[in-house]
Image (cartoon, rainbow, N blue to C red):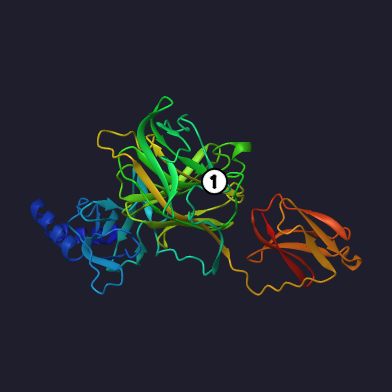
Amino acid sequence: MSNDFLYKIQLPIFEKKPSMKPQLLIAFFAFLSTQCWSFNVTFRLDFSGVNISGTPEVNGTFNNWCGSCAPMSDEDGDGIWERTINLAAGNYEYKFSYSNWSGQEYLAEGTFCTTTAGQFTNRVLVVTDVTILPVVCWGQCSTCIEPDPINWELFWSDEFDGDALDTEIWTPEFGASGWGNNEWQYYTANESNVDVVDGKLIINAREESYLGADYTSARIVTNNKFEFMYGRVEARIKLPMGQGIWPAFWMLGANFEDVGWPHCGEIDIMEHVNNEMQTHGTVHWFNNNHTYTGLPTPLDPTQFHNYGMYWDEEKIQFYVNDFIYNQFNITTSNSSSPIFNRPFFFLLNVAVGGNWPGYPNNNTPFPATMEVDYVRVYKPQVVNVEEQETASLSIFPNPANDMLQLVTDEERVGQRYQVLSQDGKVVLSGMVANSNQQLQLESLSAGIYFVKIGKEQIRFVKQ
């Protein structure tokens, strides 16, 4: 109700009963507040993708953040949980948690459904009438993000089917420099730290003295061996738990050696610290200074989960077991473009200690083992593509590296050529200057492409 309405009620009361006692006035308005200005509000939460058992609850300024006071229910078992609460008209903050604050959702700052005060970001609600709120997804302002309707085909993978790490793909890194985070481990290529066993990559962090360090572990990278831009990435991983343990599956820009961090960009597909029952998806980049943003999602990290991301020229979406829990938009306004519109490479490691998790204690179990079943990269399937190799158009070498030789007949000179990605986007174009010319491919990531002139096109692979 508006203040004007309150004033209209107050004025005749004082005129008719000027001697009414203040206690009676307070009681009267308390009666109006509870009878006329309170409304049923139904909260609705899509909890189906959250990878943990527990009963969700809604709590906020209306119940003094009592986790056990408003458990939600899913009577039809469709994954949409509800709770109706009678609330007085007014402004509120709230959020969802589960099992009496065993865990809670984390919300992004600056979104339309949240407000941030200090270290807390909560949902906001204005009650003016009976309300059934729209279904929202855990940690998001709206319903759960659905992946784009793309048919994916496997582009690259390491299934870890051998009996040792494939050094044609991965390079072990070495040292105990702290790696920018004041970590305590010494990274080695010892089999006790990194090995392939029974179809899985094993990375062990161990408590042992080694070249001046008290712990050993492993960090492996695909830098200068496999780099790519855009697609769907997925790794099936089982994680260790323990104070000071920090496993990660992540990516750095392929220009890391030239521009350094954070100018190269960083995509953390999975990070886990200590004994948390959640994982984090985060991006880091340079926007006048080091900038980062990310969100966690709850799960039991000691079980295998599929950690992944969808990445295109406009966005990065983080998911666990097909549940998209975080989306980052790549724009020039936040300086993330062109940083995240370039090739990246993979890293897998288990750190011991560091600025974020802190450091091991007497209760930290060793060895701390991360198991990786596979790492896969998918690209969109090519549809309605016809290859027409004719005497008037040919290319070599195929596969190509940084240069492709384009051979045409004289009639093609002066016509326009295009290089298309798998999903049909033009990534290079120009005029055919002569019947035997070179196309420079340095700007392209590894993948499948097509050279097209007129109605003719030929498929090639960029290594």
The residue located at (81%, 71%) in the rendering is 390
Q: Residue at x 64, y 54 (%)?
A: 446
Does the rendering let one see residue 182? yes
Mark 1: give few (<14), some (14-19) or many (20+) Cα within 10 Å. Answer: many
The residue lying furthest to the front in this view is: 163
The residue nearer to you, when weighing 83 against 325, is 325
Quarter the C terminus occupies? bottom right
Q: Residue 184 location, x and y as percent?
A: 40, 31
Q: For numbered disc 1, what is the local secondary structure?
A: loop
Q: Residue furthest top?
A: 212
- Count every numbered label the image shows and give the total: 1
The quadrant holding residue 382 is bottom right
Indicate left or right for 431 with 310 as reference. right
Horizontally, is 391 left or right of 281 in the view?
right
Q: Position of residue 428 (x, y in %)?
A: 73, 58
Which residue, as the protein is rendered here, is positioned at the far right? 410
Give coordinates of residue 55: x percent, y percent: 23, 61
Q: Quadrant of the N terminus?
A: bottom left
Residue 323: x and y in percent read 40, 62
Amino acid identity at mark 1: Trp
In the rendered image, the vertical position of residue 305 relative to residue 392, given as above or below: above
Residue 110 seen in the figure: no
| 71 is higher (above) or lower (below) than 351 | below
At 74% across and 67% down in the image, what residue appears? 458
Residue with the mark numbered 1: 170
Relative horizontal placement of residue 172, taking residue 58 as reference (left or right): right
* Direction from residue 179 to residue 461 in the image, left or right: right
Q: Quadrant of residue 409?
A: bottom right
